[in-house]
Image (spheres, grey):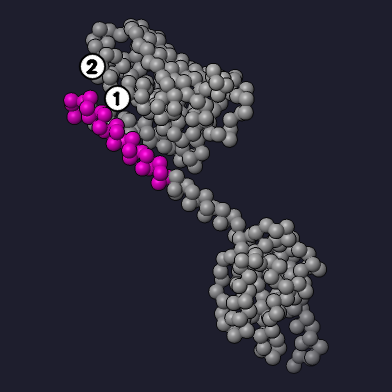
Amino acid sequence: MASSGGTFRQNANADARLAAIVDSSYDAIIGKDLNSIITDWNRAAERMFGYSAEEAIGQPILMLIPEHMQDEEVEIIAKIRAGERIPSFETARRRKDGSLVAVSLTISPIKNSAGEIVGASKIARDISAAKESERRIRLLMREVNHRVKNQFAVILSMVRETSKRSTDPGEFEELIRARIMALSRSHDLLVTSEWAGASLFDLVQEHLKPFGHEERISLSGPLLTLQSNAVQNLGMAFHELGTNSSKYGALAAEGGRIEITWKVEAGPDAQRRFRLLWHETSSAPAVGAQQKMTERKGFGERKGFGTVVLQRVAPQSLSGSSSLERSPGSVKWELDAPLEAIVVPQLGAEDGSDFNG
């Protein structure tokens, strides 16, 4: 039979272990009486709310609750007094510096040795990171929904315009498949960055990669991160230029070369401008190839879908202008647009000097 002294020591050890567990808990653990006065305050509560134990103990718990939410405490105490169970719930609490923190609260009654409810223990877990993640997911889903609708509109336009210029079903299927895959490549770049934008270098390389002959292509310009709208529309332009070049231009002829350069400079109204030049050179195509280019691709006399993209769709969507010049053995496409329509805003230098490299 254990002595009363042994029982006392066991109880003291158990209390000491419990106190150590509470004190080392990652979650804030707070005790309060039925008058909502703080009686216990662990180290995690100090870290979460900014008050030391000396500052908090003896103070009303309402100092942690925003004014517009203080009815919560009235309901909590009423349920604790009645012995009702309070399910865990999410709310907000106020720190010493006045800022709010999102928390998940678990509240349990505290009973004395006679089994009477004398207070409540509150475990608060900081869920700010989880709430921020939820917010970002909601924003991303709204952005994805908007982009998907936009992609549908672009695809429908592609189908309509390509069908007008295709008499052979096989050719129509081939062109539509290639153009949708090009949209997909731009989409992949945006998804990788969570729709924050994409590097212009990456965009050009991604769209010209399927055509091969990387050694014939040179890129030159400052590092720019493009807005999602610019990624989509410039991606379409690079695909049409690359397709034409691989069939009839520099990538189809021995010794052909493509130079893609871009720069940022001040315009006449001091507004920063983005200027891009696609210049490909090659030996003059054979008469048959030149005729096919005119009939099928539209970089000649009859406007094809590629020409529409380069002369109207891309420049108009970027609030700019463009010019397309072609001659035997040469294609030049120039785009001039306001920089603010091209780059991610927060990455732009105020005077544009960081872009001139």
Q: Which residue is tagged 2?
A: 295
Amino acid under disc 2: Glu
Q: Is residue 243 visible?
A: no
Dot 1: element: helix
Residue 53 placement (x, y as % from top left):
78, 68
Q: Which residue is tagged 1?
A: 305
Any magenta on residue 160?
yes
**Which corner quadrant holds the N terminus?**
bottom right
Residue 115 placement (x, y as % from top left):
66, 89
Q: Give me the C-alpha separation between circle 2 and circle 1.
A: 12 Å
Residue 167 placement (x, y as % from top left):
18, 25
152 is higher (above) or lower (below) than 15: above
Q: Residue at x 52, y 30 (%)?
A: 340
Q: Are marks 2 and 1 in contact (CB under 8 Å)?
A: no
Q: Residue at x 64, y 59 (%)?
A: 101
Q: State whether the magenta stretch is mostly helix, strand or loop.
A: helix
Dot 2: element: helix
Q: Residue at x 65, y 66 (%)?
A: 67
Amino acid under disc 1: Phe
Q: Earlier in the sequence, mark 2 or mark 1?
A: 2
Is 62 left or right of 323, judged from the image as shown?
A: right
For residue 188, what is the image quadrant? top left
353 is higher (above) or lower (below) than 131: above
The boundaries of the magenta stretch are 144-170
Extreme residue in the front direction:
269
